[in-house]
Each structure stands twice: as structure tokens, then as C-alpha cells.
Amino acid sequence: MSLDNTRLKGLAFAAALLCAGGAAVSALAAGSGGGELHAAPPGRSELHTWKPPQYRANGLSGAQTLATLTHRFGALARARGASDTLPQYAAETVGADFALPFGANPALSRRVLVRSGTVMYVVPGRGFVCLVTQAGVGSCVSAADAVAGKFFVLEQGQGVPRGDTRLYGFVPNGVRTVSLSTVHGPTVHVQVRDNAWLLETHRLPASIRWNNLGRSIVIRIPRASVQM
């Protein structure tokens, strides 16, 4: 897999922007600096518009990153089993595109979701965490963004029905439902499983919302990021 074959959309990438067989993929992280969100008081909402975060090497080891993530993500705290091993295309993506810049370690991978023909894996790195599907499509953001719940992937192209958009992400413990608001359409709700969620829509996505510990996070999706 090579970034030379990537078809970029009108959205700057957060940490890595990859594609598999013509699928366009964007990793989204809210906020302007890639740092942690400041928690709003209980009952208040936090509204963010996606902006390209600025990432810097933080010197964290893979073990330190995993230790940080296991406190917030139950999927990474459980023992690793045979089903957590990355399949061929996912392993190729991690090895070719995620290992060097983000320290993604396949030995730490966990399978977190099987839905609508998509199998999703989370792979911790050195200060980063990556999501990758069995087809080898995915991306990475900083561990801080993941802990803050600011990590989801928007995918269009091969493997996604024509005119549809596939969105999936990784959220902290306690988040049970993720909601997608669409332009001129209904709000779609999806259940979180092992900290992961996935949905597909044929409408123009407008924003993602999730609630945890009395606060609401809303991330607006710029129209320029979606091809309809």
C-alpha cells in the first residue's frame, strides 16, 4: 500500500490519510492543537469543528501509551486472544504506513468490532493509537485525542456503496451510543461495542455526538470533507 495512490479529499489529514483500492479515508480529530479537551461542567455541551491538529513527537514508549489507554478503553485492558491477530491486509497497512511514524505495534492489536461486513482493529503505538479494518483501511491519531473521544474515520470509495459514507471511531469507556446528524435527514444512533462504533449513511453527514459523565461532545463535519 502506498500513499502515492491515495485520493485525497478536501480535508487535511489528522495523522495519516490512507486508502485501499481507491477508498478515500480521513482521520478526524476535533480541536486546533491536538491536545486534550477541557471538560465542560456537567450538563454542558462542548462543540468543536474539525481542524487539522498539530502533532509532535512526545517521547512516549509503546508500553507507556498502552498503560495510559487501558485505563480509558476496556477493549485494550482485556487479555489478547487469537482473534485479535491482524489479518493480512490490516497487517500490511500497519507495517507499511503506521509502524514507523506512529510506532503502531501489531502485537498489541485488539479486534473491537464486527458489523456490516467490517471487522475493525485498534493498534496502539508510541503516543498514538490506530484504527484499521480487515481491508487495510484506517488511520491514527494521538493517544490524547483518542482519550478525549476525538477520533473517528470517514471513508468513501471502493468497498462503500456508491453515494454512501462510512464512519467509524473509538471512544472511551462509558460511551454507549454515538449519534450522527445528517443534513436534511434524521439523526442516526449506533451502539458502541468494545469502545468502537460504525455506521453508514447515504445522506450528507453533519456532526457526530456522544455523551459521557454528564457532558456532551459534538464534532461538526465540514461539507468539504464529504463527496456526494
Image (spheres, rainbow, N blue to C red):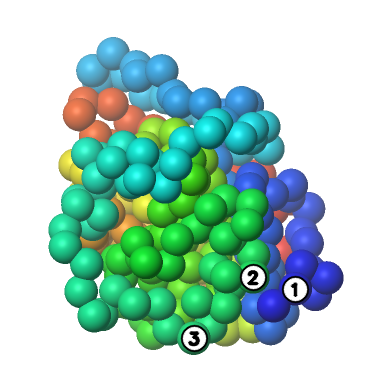
Image position, residue 216 (x, y; %): 33, 31
Decide which of tag 2 and tag 3 comes sooner along the chain: 3
Q: Secondary structure at mark 3?
A: helix
Image position, residue 122 (x, y; %): 39, 61
Decide which of tag 1 and tag 3 comes sooner along the chain: 1
Instruction: Answer left or right for 29 relative to 118.
Output: right
Question: What mark, if any, has residue 88 been given in the picture?
Answer: 3
**Which three-letter amino acid code belongs to the residue tagged 1?**
Ser
**Which three-letter amino acid code belongs to the residue tagged 3?**
Gln
Q: Nearer the viewer, residue 193 or 81?
A: 81
Q: Nearer the viewer, residue 43 or 174?
A: 174
Residue at which label 2 appears = 96
Residue at which label 1 appears = 2
Determine whether 170 is above or below 1 in the image: above
Q: Label 3 neighbourhood size at 10 Å, few (<14), some (14-19), many (20+)?
A: few
Decide which of tag 2 and tag 1 comes sooner along the chain: 1
Residue 6 image-quadrant placement:
bottom right
Q: Marks 2 and 3, how far apart in space?
A: 12 Å
Q: Marks 1 and 3, how far apart in space?
A: 16 Å
Residue 37 image-quadrant placement:
top left
- Residue drawn at x 64%, y 45% is 14
Image position, residue 214 (x, y; %): 21, 26
Q: Secondary structure at mark 1?
A: loop
Q: Secondary structure at mark 2?
A: helix
